[in-house]
Amino acid sequence: MAPDDGLEQDVLAAANLRAALILLGALVEGGLGHLVLAPGSRSGPLAAAAGLLQRRRALALHTAIDERSAAFFALGLGRGSGRAAAVITTSGTAVANLLPAAVEADFGTIPLLLISADRPARLKHCGANQTVNQERFLLASVRWLGEGDPAGLAAMEAASLEQLARRALAATAAGPDGPAGPVHLNLPFEEPLHAGAEALEALAQTPLAPAPPVPLARPLTAPAPIGLAGLDPRRPGLVVAGPWRGCPQAWPGFLAALRRWQQHCGWPLLADGLSGLRGIPGLASLAGYDLLAAPPAELLADQVLRLGPLPASRPLQQLLQRCGGRQLLISEGDPRRLDPLGCCPQQWCGGLEAWVEQLPPAPPQPSQANRRHAAAWQEADRDLQAWLDQQLGGGPGDGGGAPWSEPALARLLARMLPAELPLVIANSSPVRDWESFTPADGPWRPIHAFRGASGIDGTLSLACGVAEAAGRAVLLTGDLALLHDSNGWLWHHQLGGRLTVVLIDNGGGGIFEQLPIRCQPEGPLDFERLFAMPQAVDPLALAAAHGVPGRAPLGSEALERDLAWALDLPMALLLLRSDRRRDAERRRQLRRMAPVPASAP
């Protein structure tokens, strides 16, 4: 439908707006609740339609000037709610900025709908301005690519638009073809793009015909039952839980199934720091395994039930390899291979709850051998946790202004942060310290970390999205990860939830201090410039420039006081300065000095 076909310009502009309104309206009818809009001209009909729908209170509309930040905010919304949020961008390089979030949504199994406006086919491959092959930018990561009519969205019938919307939204959810994840809708628009005030007023007053009731979720086809797959609950074994990647709605059933399995077999639960299983009453989880470089044979088992993706702990990975090949991996709807170690011959994607339900009746209580094995693990973990309390107790040197210890901070915050308060942990050093040094007896809280691709893209925007979905959240991050997404501070003025940012500032990339690449004394390699990359930015000043207040507490008492202050504000920053070189050496010392469980006589 080209502008020279005789139609009045305002008629075509109104047709573009009506088409966009029908498509977005069908998404809303299907359950879309949040939409994030980035600025642009080609996406003008979509923006206007989103504004009209917000005016009707049909959806929550958020705006962002940075497409990458917009996509990560939507990703946080999807992680916190279990439902896809949508992002609208204009054409060209705007679409390329969606790729980092699409990659994380793919590997993290997070529902996400990415909608891009495009030029019509007649402007493709002829040198037209801002016309690129954007339909291919996200192909490697999305579950499905949906495209509007090449002549323009206004050329599509209402039924076709509604069908396109239904299929896109359904493809973001878990189904027989794969887990939840990102979907890309690429929608061409022919000019003129912007309807006038008269058309806007007319459509604002016109009720949309409701879409026919079509189920939007993809039908789930349960995988064939797998049974015990060689596991014998009467004999000693281990449960290893990796980062949680199921949807929030599946969590209660997963937890009940895990409790049932542990009650019947008594197997020790080695819970990754991102599993969300530490600190749950009545669940015997262990946390000190990452410091056990070579556990004695008494702690090993020749059978392992693995839940979800592989934990990042290298010592735990080595333990799994020593345990042998009688291992069963159960994922929450993800059929993709999740065993890079190659020691788990069987994987089942039906979810732990369904697996436990199909098992034969279990013995009324764990066998004596299982109880002895579990007791050995519990004793080793108690000894290690008591030792860590001695090594990492206290603050940064109260009253002296000394730097904070990052391992000690992880342990302190795990106990200090309020129970059930959602926590977002940035990649690099914070997530590793949380894995290694937090106790299993801290209060339970939802843990959100984005380890699918383990990048630092969009850290602050992700946390804002989680806070928006959950109502409140805390972000624990390093300085480079926070600076990498400094545009995330812009969410402050429209954030509905509360977010407290706890920044561990070690003056650069502290994670690289743990690699054997720094010369002692400094030699030909400029470590600071090539790896650490410290930045001369005052985080408190940067936050203040965006209207976000901050404090830099010194000592555990000041941290507790300032944390209470920050949690009462819509958004606040707590700055904790540390010494990355000292902390890297401290981590090495702790690993060398960690007590080794005694072997049985």
Image (tube, helix red, strand yellow):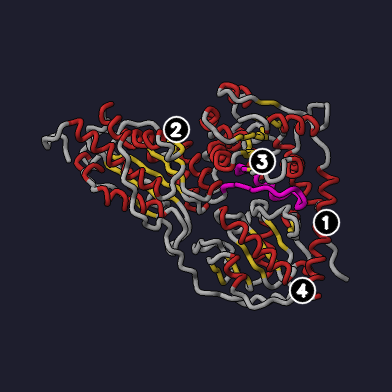
Where residue 340 sits in the image (x, y, percent)? 56, 61
For label 2, the residue is: 63
**Regarding mark 2 in the picture, which secondary structure is present there?**
strand
Left/right placement of residue 115 relative to residue 155 reads right
> Is the residue marked by circle 2 packed among few (<14), some (14-19), or many (20+) residues within 10 Å?
some
> Is the residue marked by circle 1 packed among few (<14), some (14-19), or many (20+) residues within 10 Å?
some
Q: What is the span of residues highlighted in magenta in the rendered image? A: 424-450
For label 4, the residue is: 365
> Is the residue marked by circle 3 packed among few (<14), some (14-19), or many (20+) residues within 10 Å?
many
Which label was assigned to residue 382?
A: 1
Residue at (59, 60) in percent of width and height: 308
Q: Earlier in the sequence, mark 1 or mark 3?
A: 1
Q: Earlier in the sequence, mark 1 or mark 4?
A: 4
Amino acid tagged 4: Gln
Left/right placement of residue 331 relative to residue 5 reads right
Where residue 471 sits in the image (x, y, percent)? 59, 39
**Regarding mark 4 in the picture, which secondary structure is present there?**
loop
**3D distance between C-alphas at marks 4 and 2:** 55 Å
**Regarding mark 1 in the picture, which secondary structure is present there?**
helix
Label tally:
4
For label 3, the residue is: 513
Camera sees residue 93: no
Q: Nearer the viewer, mark 4 or mark 3?
A: 4
Amino acid tagged 3: Glu
Q: Nearer the viewer, mark 1 or mark 4?
A: 4
Residue at (64, 42) in percent of width and height: 511
**3D distance between C-alphas at marks 2 and 3:** 38 Å
Q: Earlier in the sequence, mark 1 or mark 2?
A: 2
